[in-house]
Image (spheres, grey):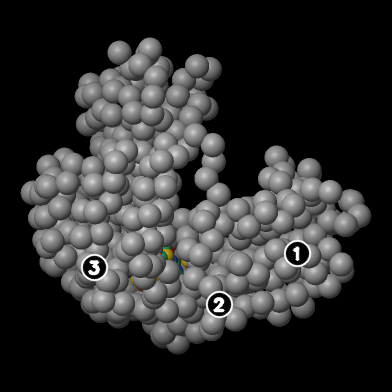
Amino acid sequence: MRRSVYIKTFGCQMNAVDSARMLSLLSKADYDVAPSLEDADLVLLNTCSIREKADQKIYSELGVLRRWKTLRDGRLVGVGGCLAQQAGEALRSRAPHVDIVFGTHNISKLPEMVRLAERRTPSVKIGMEGEMTHWETAPYLAEGAASSMLTIMQGCDNFCAYCIVPAVRGREVSRPSADILEEARALAGKGVREIVLLGQNVNSYGKKEGEIPFHDLLRRIAKVDGISRIRFITSHPRDLDERTIGLFSEVEALCPHLHLPIQSGSDRILTAMGRGYGRREYLSKILRLRAARPGMAFSSDFIVGFPGESEDDFRDTLSVMEEVRYDSSFSFRFSPRPGTRAWEMGDRVGPEESRERLRTLQSLQDRHSRERLMEAVGKEMEVLVEGKSPKGPGKLCGRTPCHKMMNFTPGRSGGHLRKVHVVSFGAHSLSGEER
Ligand code: SAH
Ligand code: SF4
Ligand code: F3S
C-alpha cells in the first residue's frame, strides 16, 4: 500500500533542493506527496541551524509533532538537514518521538531508514565520509515548472568566523561539468526556461577538481537550447572574478541581478569575520558589474552586532548600503554558533544595541527597496510565469529579470515568458498588465 509524506523545509535553497531529492527517492519507495500534515503518514523536517533561532524553531515544531504522531497509528517523524547533522543522537534524546535522524550526506539512505522505522526500529545516520554526493539523486521537478535549481557544488571551505555551514555541510566538492550540462539539457527538455546554479560559493567552482572555471560553465549553460535565463547563488565577493563580471555584458541569458553578500561595511569587522575582501574591493566589483550590465540589481546579506562591532563600524555598514542602494537584502543579528571561531570571541555587542542596529539597517533597506520598485513603474518587463497570483482571480505571478516579483493581469499570449507593463508597486512586489 502506498503511504504519504509531508516535508517541511527550513533554511536556504540547498535544503529546498535536498527536499526535492528526498521526494524523488521516496516516490520510488511507495510514498506519495501528502497535501497537508494532517494527511501524512510520514513527516520530514529538513532543518537549518544557521542561527540559534533556527534551532529553536525546529525544536518547537518537534513539540507539535509529538502530539501529531499520537493521533494516528503508524505515523513516523524524520529529521534531516543541518540541525540533524549538528545534533545527531542528541536530537533523539531531546525528542524521543523522532524515528529517523539523517545528516546532510545521508539522503540516499532515507528509503531504507524509513523501512526500518515502519518496523519500529529508529535509526540515526550522520556520517559524511564515503557517503554519496547530493547530486547522485535527481531532485523531483514539479509538473510544468519554468524554473529549476541545479546543484553545481556542495559544502564550503571558507570557514567565515561566524558560520556553521562548513561544519554541517562538509568540505567543498564540485560536480563534474559534463553532468551539470547533462542535467541542464534534461531540464530544458522538460520545459524549464530558467536555471539557478546552486552552491555555497559558486565562484570557486571546480578549482579543487581542476574542472573548467565557473565562467566557462556559465557560457556553456547559456548555449543549452531552450534556456533563456541563468542565475547563480551564492557568490562570494572575494572569488567573483573579472571573467565572470565580463560575462554580464556578453551573455544575454545571464539575469541582471546578483546576490552578493557583503555582511559588513567595516574593514575591521570584515577582517575579524575572515571574509577575505575589503569594502573598497567589494564596491569596485559592484561598479564594474554595473558597467558591464547597466541597471543591474543587487541584493545582500548583513550581520549586525558581530563581536567588537562599534557604532563607527555600524555606520560603515549603513554607508555601504547607501552607496549600493540594494534592491533587497537579508539582515540578521549575530548569533553565536558552537564550534565556530566567533563563538569564542569576546567583546560581544549587547542585545538591545544589536536590535536597534538591525531596526535602523532594515528601515534604510525598506526605503531603498521601495525606491527600486518605484523606478520600475511605467516600464515594460519580461516575466517568467511561476503560476497563479495570490493577488486576485485570473492574475498570474512571476519574476522579472531583476528578480522582482510581479503580479499581473495576463493578455492572450500564453507561454512561460510574457511582456508586462508595470502599473504600480506594493510593499514587496510589482503589479502590471500584459498588453
Ligand atoms: N554561502 C552564503 C550564505 C550562507 S548563510 C554566503 O557565503 O554568503 C546565509 C547568511 O546567514 C549569511 O550570508 C549570513 O549573513 C547569515 N549568517 C550566517 N551565520 C550567521 C550567524 N552566526 N549569525 C547571524 N547571521 C548569520
Ligand atoms: Fe558560511 Fe562563509 Fe561558507 Fe558562506 S562562505 S557558507 S558565510 S563559511
Ligand atoms: Fe541553514 Fe544549512 Fe542552509 S544551516 S542556511 S539550511 S546550509
Task: Give the side of residue 419 with respect to residue 136, left or right.
Answer: left
The alpha-carbon separation of the residues under discs 1 and 2 comes to 18 Å
**Foreground pick, 283 / 364:** 283
Q: In the rendering, which numbered label is found on residue 131?
A: 2
Q: Nearer the viewer, residue 379 or 216?
A: 216
> Between disc 3 and disc 2, whose residue precedes?
2
* Image point (91%, 55%), residue name: 73
Is mark 3 in CB contact (under 8 Å) with mark 1?
A: no
| Circle 2: residue type | Glu
| Mark 1 Cα-neighbour bin, 10 Å: few <14, some 14–19, many ≥20 | many
> Which of the 4 image quadrants contains residue 332?
bottom left
Image position of 39 (left or right of 399):
right
Q: Position of residue 434 (x, y in %)?
A: 33, 17
**Which residue bears the numbered disc 1?**
114
Q: CA distance from mark 3 to mark 1?
A: 39 Å
- Circle 3 sits on which residue? 212
Element under label 3?
loop
User: Residue 17 in the image: x percent, y percent?
Assistant: 50, 55
Q: Earlier in the sequence, mark 1 or mark 2?
A: 1
Identified by mark 1, the residue type is Val
Q: Secondary structure at mark 1?
A: helix
| Residue sitting nearer the eye, 219 or 345 | 219
Q: Residue at x 51, y 65 (%)?
A: 136
Image: 20 above or below 373: below
Q: Nearer the viewer, mark 3 or mark 1?
A: 3
